[in-house]
Amino acid sequence: MTQLFFSEYEDDPTLAPRPLAIVGAGGLGREIAVLVAQLNEAGAAWDLRGFYDDRPPATPTVGGLPYLGTLADLNATASPLAVAVAVGSSASRAAVVARLTSPNLSFPALVHPQVALRPAQRVALGEGCLIQRGCILTCDITLGRFVLLNLGCTLGHDSVLEDFCSLMPHANVGGGAHLGAGAYLGTNATVIQQVRVGAGTTVGAGAVAVRDLPPHCTAVGVPAKPIAEQ
């Protein structure tokens, strides 16, 4: 899991606009387009070209931006292009990233400009992380590759989120908690301090994980308990 400290991702205002495209032409994709606009308003220099998706939208534009083609078309791009993978499901996002093989593609971390991340916080981000408005990260936190933090999430000290974790709006992770690769927290879900959530596990909306959860299960309720798959 390769991380860079957030300060290494900060935009240089002297650079020319950098082309960027979004994978995922659904609701999350449109939200990430808004995030890019907010970053540009704060001084970034992204040139947002449009959307790629294997499932073409019903109209030729999405949120005023063009539909550009499929993942195969994206892999065929002949020049450097930054990409934001706006796919909400952890497993689906990992599957999409595995298919993006062109050496011309890069995956910057995009963090809302009002999210406080300073060198003294010692927050490390992997490539492709997306962090939306209202998130609060304290200190000594590690995020793996392609982690998604939706609106208003909180992460406590020494928490670790491995690759492809997904937190839906207002999910909360306590100090020292550890989320395995691909873990998914539903809206308003909470993982209290020091609890470990196994890889690929879903913590349902509003659930509270007070004890460790095994991998590849769905846990609901307060306290959160694994449920039998139907």
Image: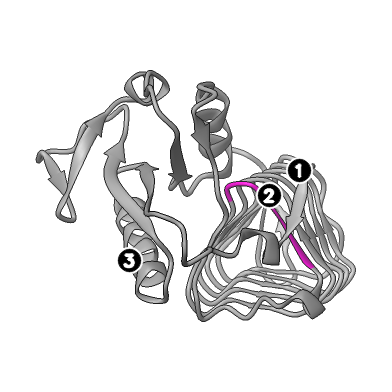
**Quarter location, residue 225:** bottom right
Q: Tell me the SS state at disc 2.
A: loop
The residue singled out by tag 1 in the image is 199
Residue 13: in magenta span: no
Give the camera-side residue of 215 and 138. 138
Cα separation between marks 3 and 2: 28 Å
Amino acid type, residue under disc 1 in the picture: Ala
Cα separation between marks 2 and 1: 5 Å
Q: Position of residue 162 (x, y in %)?
A: 75, 49
Q: Position of residue 181 (x, y in %)?
A: 73, 44
Q: Earlier in the sequence, mark 2 or mark 1?
A: 2
Residue 37, label in figure? 3
Q: Position of residue 158 (x, y in %)?
A: 87, 69
Q: Tell me the SS state at disc 1.
A: loop
* Residue at x-position 72% and y-position 64%: 224
Hey, which residue is sitting farthest front in the picture? 14
Q: Tell me the SS state at disc 3.
A: helix
Q: Earlier in the sequence, mark 1 or mark 3?
A: 3
Give the camera-side residue of 12 and 87. 12
Q: How many C-alpha atoms fall within 10 Å of the one at disc 3: few (<14), some, or many (≥20)?
A: some
Tell me if residue 98 comes above or below residue 166 in the rendering. above
Contact between labelled residues 1 and 2, with CB atoms less than 8 Å apart: yes
The residue singled out by tag 2 in the image is 183
Residue 126: in magenta span: yes
Magenta residues span 123-128
